Image (cartoon, rainbow, N blue to C red):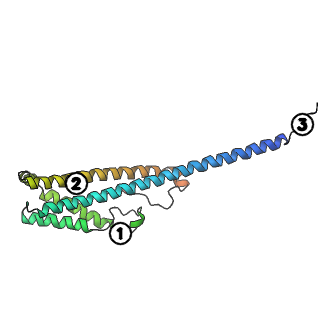
Amino acid sequence: MISAAPLLPPAAIDALLAVLLVVVIVLVAGWFLFAYAVRVDRLHRQVLAARLIVSGQLSKRAHAAIELANAQVLDQADSEKLCQAAHDASRCEEPIVGDGLDPRNRTGNAAKRVAYENQLTSVMREVLTDETRNSLMQEADATALLRRLDAAQQKLEVAVHVHNNQVKDARKVRQRALVRIAHLAGRAPLPAPVEI
C-alpha cells in the first residue's frame, strides 16, 4: 500500500495555526474594544437623554410657578417676584450643563442658566413659607396650583438625581485604563453633573 504524502509539512501547519490563532485573537480583541466603545457611547446618550428630561422638568416647574404667581393667590410683591424669577428661568435658552457633550449646545453659558434656575428655587423658598402654604391650602384653586408646583419640583429633583447618576456611571467607565488608552470615548468631553 502506498501512503499519501502530507500536503503541507508539519512546520507549515504549525505556522498556519499560529497565524490563524493571531487572527482570531485580533478579531476577538477588536470586537471587545468595539463593544466597549459602544457602551461608552450608550452611556453618553443616556446622559443626554436624562439631560433632556431635566430640561423638560425645569420648564414645567417654571410654568407651574408662573401659573401660581398669576393666579392672584399670593400678595402682589411675592407674585411679582415669583413671576419674574420663573420668567427669567423659562426664557433662558442656555444649556443646563456646559460640558460640551451635547453636539447642539457645545457653546453656551450654562452658569447663566444655573443661576436663573437657582434664583427661581430661592424665590420659591422665600415666597412659599409654611405660613403661606397653609393659607394657600385653604383655597381649592390655590391648593391645586401649589400641588402642581410641588409635583414639578419633586419630579425635577428626581430627574436631576437620575441625570447625575448617569454622569457618575459614564465617568466611572471613562476613567478605566482601557477606555483611556484605547481612546474609546473618542473626542467626546467628560460629562458633568447638573448643579441645580
Q: In the rendering, at what x and y percent does residue 166 appear?
A: 38, 51
The local secondary structure at tag 1 comes to loop
Q: Amino acid at mark 1?
A: Gly
Q: Amino acid at mark 3?
A: Ala
Q: In the rendering, at what x and y percent does residue 54 appear?
A: 31, 56
Residue 114 seen in the figure: yes
Q: Amino acid at mark 2?
A: Ala
The local secondary structure at tag 2 comes to helix
Q: In the rendered image, which quarter contains the C terminus?
A: bottom left
Q: Residue at x 23, y 51 (%)?
A: 154
The local secondary structure at tag 3 comes to loop
Q: Label 1, on which residue?
A: 108
Picture quarter containing residue 20?
top right
Pick the residue in front: 13 or 179.
13
Q: CA distance from mark 2 to mark 1?
A: 25 Å
Q: Residue at x 44, y 49 (%)?
A: 172
Pick the residue in front: 129 or 102.
102
Circle 3 or circle 2, nearest the eye = 3
Neighbour tally class for label 2: few under 14, some 14-19, many 20 plus, Cα within 10 Å: many
Q: Residue at x 30, y 52 (%)?
A: 159
Pointers 1 and 3 in contact (C-beta within 8 Å) = no
Q: Label 2, on which residue?
A: 152
Circle 1 or circle 3, nearest the eye = 3
Q: In the visual, does 135 lie left or right of 156? A: left
Q: How many marks?
A: 3
Label at residue 26:
none
Q: CA distance from mark 1 to mark 3?
A: 77 Å
**Disc with the residue nearer the chain's start (2 vs 1):** 1
Q: Residue at x 24, y 59 (%)?
A: 60
Q: Label 3, on which residue?
A: 4
Picture quarter containing residue 2?
top right
Circle 2 or circle 1, nearest the eye = 2
